[in-house]
Image (tube, rainbow, N blue to C red):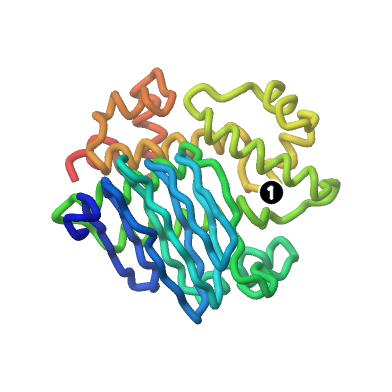
């Protein structure tokens, strides 16, 4: 709880087995002074701004994170000043990632892309470095899942940790383009395939046709179809089904929708087809997830 003169709200925190610290801020600041902190160590933080504009000065460098965006931030031996928004609700989710865990994940993911990646290479002797991105439907669903779990008495720390790891994996792949490059694909082609992936995640309810998607990202349809399968291990339409069912699972698990509502919300007009594909993917019916 904050001091009364600062504002009203709460900070929720969960430390996971892997060392990830999940922190959920929900504050309404009155006239907040800058919040100062410093560290001689190294930090990796995955941040999501959900409400309330904020500004941070890290060792003199200004960083702003717009609402609806996230960032993967790297810091070492730094001082920081956080300027909270006055007279508005500030809601954010932060995942504190142990550097050893980031390095392990980077080594595993980058190896398949024939690259070398770790904390030292990313920060490159700077005090801080941040990679900003717009939140898509998948990351929003995962973030909302974590926020709702903080309000549940019988939450599962293991499921929350799994969601945090999913978010880290998702954004590491996106930011550093850690995708195996097949023959005939340039680095720019792979970047465009990642853009195509983001377009599908943002428009999963009404995805564009292959031809429209290829025009949108600037790849011919043959390269899009073959490259997408080579890079991500599934066709474009298989990926749409994957993210739809994934989103539906989170909606049902959070009790945010009925089975019919979940089907409609992710783009299915036929509930029977939705239930059949859901069962094939997860080995249980959507109604069984609701009962849990």
Up-down: is 204 above or below 142? above
Q: Nearer the viewer, residue 27 or 156?
A: 27
Q: Is residue 243 left or right of residue 276?
A: right
Give x and y (percent) for residue 94. Answer: 40, 57
Give x and y (percent) for residue 47. Answer: 45, 55
Q: Nearer the viewer, residue 25 or 84?
A: 84
Residue depicted at 54% across the width and 41% down the height: 134
Dot 1 crowding, Cα within 10 Å, few <14, some 14–19, many 20+: some
The quarter of the picture where the N terminus appears is bottom left
Q: Classify residue 191 by image quadrant.
A: top right
Up-down: is 1 above or below 249? below
Element type where label 1 sits in the image: helix
Question: Of all residues shown, which one is farthest toward the bottom?
Answer: 40
Q: Which residue is mark 1?
A: 231
Q: Classify residue 273 by image quadrant.
A: top left
Residue depicted at 39% across the width and 72% down the height: 18
Q: Is residue 227 left or right of residue 234?
A: right
Q: How many marks?
A: 1
Q: Classify residue 281 by image quadrant.
A: top left
Question: Of all residues shown, which one is farthest toward the left?
Answer: 153
Give x and y (percent) for residue 169. Answer: 52, 57
Q: Is residue 182 left or right of residue 33?
A: right
Residue depicted at 41% across the width and 23% down the height: 268
Residue depicted at 46% across the width and 68% down the height: 97
Give x and y (percent) for residue 171. Answer: 55, 53
């Amino acid at each position: 709880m904050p001091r009364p003169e600062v504002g009203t709200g709460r900070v929720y925190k969960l430390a996971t087995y892997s060392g990830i610290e999940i922190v959920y801020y929900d504050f309404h600041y009155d006239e907040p002074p800058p919040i100062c902190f410093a560290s001689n160590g190294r930090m990796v933080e995955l941040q999501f701004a959900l409400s309330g504009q904020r500004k941070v000065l890290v060792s003199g460098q200004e960083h702003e994170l717009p609402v609806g965006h996230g960032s993967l931030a790297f810091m070492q031996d730094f001082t920081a000043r956080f300027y909270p928004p006055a007279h508005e609700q500030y809601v954010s989710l932060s995942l504190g990632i142990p550097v050893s865990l980031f390095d392990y994940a980077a080594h595993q993911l980058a190896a398949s892309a024939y690259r070398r990646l770790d904390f030292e290479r990313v920060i490159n002797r700077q005090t801080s470095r941040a990679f900003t991105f717009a939140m898509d439907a998948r990351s929003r669903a995962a973030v909302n899942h974590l926020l709702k779990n903080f309000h549940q008495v019988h939450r599962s720390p293991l499921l929350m940790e799994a969601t945090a790891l999913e978010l880290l994996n998702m954004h590491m792949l996106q930011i550093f383009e850690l995708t195996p490059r097949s023959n005939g694909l340039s680095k720019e082609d792979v970047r465009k395939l990642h853009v195509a992936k983001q377009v599908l995640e943002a428009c999963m309810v009404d995805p564009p046709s292959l031809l429209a998607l290829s025009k949108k990202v600037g790849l011919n349809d043959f390269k899009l179809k073959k490259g997408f399968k080579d890079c991500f291990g599934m066709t474009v339409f298989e990926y749409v089904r994957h993210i739809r069912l994934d989103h539906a699972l989170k909606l049902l698990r959070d009790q945010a929708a009925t089975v019919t509502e979940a089907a409609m919300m992710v783009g299915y007009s036929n509930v029977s087809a939705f239930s059949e594909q859901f069962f094939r993917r997860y080995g249980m019916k959507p109604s069984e997830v609701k009962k849990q």
